[in-house]
Image (tube, rainbow, N blue to C red):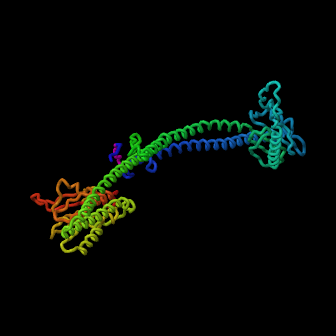
Amino acid sequence: MASVIDTARADPPESSEELPLRRRLIRFGGSRLGGLILVLNLASLLILLGGALALNEWRTGLVEARQESLLGQAELLSKVLSDEDYTRGEPVPELNRDQSAKVLIDRFVPQGQRARIFDRDGVLLVDSFDVSDTIEGEPLPPARPAGTPAPPDTGTDKAADTLETANIALEDEILAALAGDPQTTVRRSENGERVVSVSLPIRHVQQVLGVLTLEANDVDQILDAQRRALIPFALVALAVNLLASLLLHLFVARPVMRLSAAADQVRLQRARAISLPDLEDRRDEIGDLARSLESMTDTLSTRMDAIERFAADVSHEIKNPLTSIRSALETLDLVQDKDKRDRLTAVLQQDVRRLDRLITDISNASRLDAELSRDRPRPVDLSALLTDIVGVYETTSKPGEAPVTLELAVDGAARVMGRDGPLGQVFRNLIDNARSFSPAGATVRVSVIRDDVDALPLHVRVEDDGPGIPSENLETVFERFYTSRPRGAAFGSNSGLGLSIVRQIVEAHGGRVTAANRLDASGAILGALFEVALPAVGRRV
């Protein structure tokens, strides 16, 4: 049954050892597509991580810079306020409120900063907002249409809580400064804003006269600006992720969906093989998958055709002895002569033996693929295997049968990756075939040689002294049910599957088997030669 789709057999994927250095460098873990996905995802993560780290660094540096700046200003003002021109009272001095207020007016207090002076009891003496033109306020809410009821005032309690919390934090800061320790904190103001606050004790000699507090409320504004500066980083990271998702969809998801649809077509028997040339030309994992699926379905299609031909051949081969048996049985009742009846009975027995041999060989051939797939390859020493096989022939040889000799022309062990059971069947079939064609007094010779020039260096040769093989049948002998026995051989003693099984097993081990004739100097045929070439250990099977 011919395939309805003519597909080209895809080349096998390159191994990692065969990849050029340049191609391996641009791959991650042997995967070019995996490297692309990794780079894109890492790029987006690094962008976000870099932006987040930069923001944290700016925030920490900003607070520390503002604290250092306020601390320098506070130290300068505290030294001025500790001068006797700004104190009064003997023998216990205290801060002069009016003179201290002039300091806050005369000394420059930048916009966005607030300076307050407290006495030794923590009572507020001067506030820069009171002695300057600074007026704190908030934007008015949007105008409401006439008749619209006023929204409920939900911020009163929250504002009261914020003010109470701010006063408690400021009071703690002042008390700590009155104890003689300078304070630098980040707290909430009465308006709920984040402020950087510095409180320093005002000293006259060693006596603490009060506390100077400087605040800067521009931290939130600067942080908001920094957060706005992070938005481009986030947008770039989002764009990279979207691009990565798009690439994954275009180069991975859609091709896999197409391969799945093609596989469904094969499953529904609308096609015999998957063929997607645009995917097979890709040099990444999707291309490898497409080529593998095409090769697999093409192999399955070929296997189905082979099974169909095998079934037809089996049917034809079985019908021959069955037809002979039926004819003999129909004739047996009509024959009265005893000798003729005995000859018919002998024909029946011969056909039954032939049918039994044929069914046995067919069963072995049909189980061969399953046995090869279940048995895991392992190193097999051909020298030891052939020594054991030839030893069995030597001990079980009967008079008149051709003896078998072995010659090992290799140094050390001749190891191949394979399965010792099927390999043993290969050599037994070849030896049995050679013995069946050998005349009386002839010898079957088995030899093992190594040819390192050949890609399959281990060669096993089986030679006989028989009539040889017609030149036009050197390939035909490996076909199923082909047999050409010498004159006088028992009819039906061979099914014609032995050499076909040999080729099937050898090719499953990555080798080859050939047939040739041995010739003398004049070109006369001396016998047949079968040669099996197998890969040595270390080569891929």
**Camera-side residue of 308 and 87:** 308
In the image, residue 522 lies in the stretch drawn in magenta: no
The residue depicted at 50 percent of the width and 44 percent of the height is 37
In the image, residue 9 lies in the stretch drawn in magenta: yes
x, y percentage for residue 464? 18, 64
Residue extending farthest left: 522
Q: Is residue 183 in sight in this rendering? A: yes
x, y percentage for residue 260? 46, 45
Residue extending farthest top: 146
- Image quadrant of residue 111? top right
Quadrant where the C terminus sits is: bottom left
Left or right of 457 in this view: 126: right
Left or right of 282 in this view: 493: left
x, y percentage for residue 291? 39, 46
Magenta span dominant secondary structure: loop
Left or right of 222 in this view: 324: left
Q: Is residue 450 in sight in this rendering? A: no
Left or right of 160 in this view: 39: left
**Camera-side residue of 221 and 19:** 19
517 shown above or below 135? below
The residue depicted at 55 percent of the width and 40 percent of the height is 241
**What are the residue bounds of the magenta stretch?**
6-12
x, y percentage for residue 520? 12, 60
350 shown above or below 185? below
**Camera-side residue of 530 and 247:** 530
Tally of numbered tags: 0
The residue depicted at 90 percent of the width and 42 percent of the height is 89
**Camera-side residue of 521 and 116:** 521
- Image quadrant of residue 158? top right
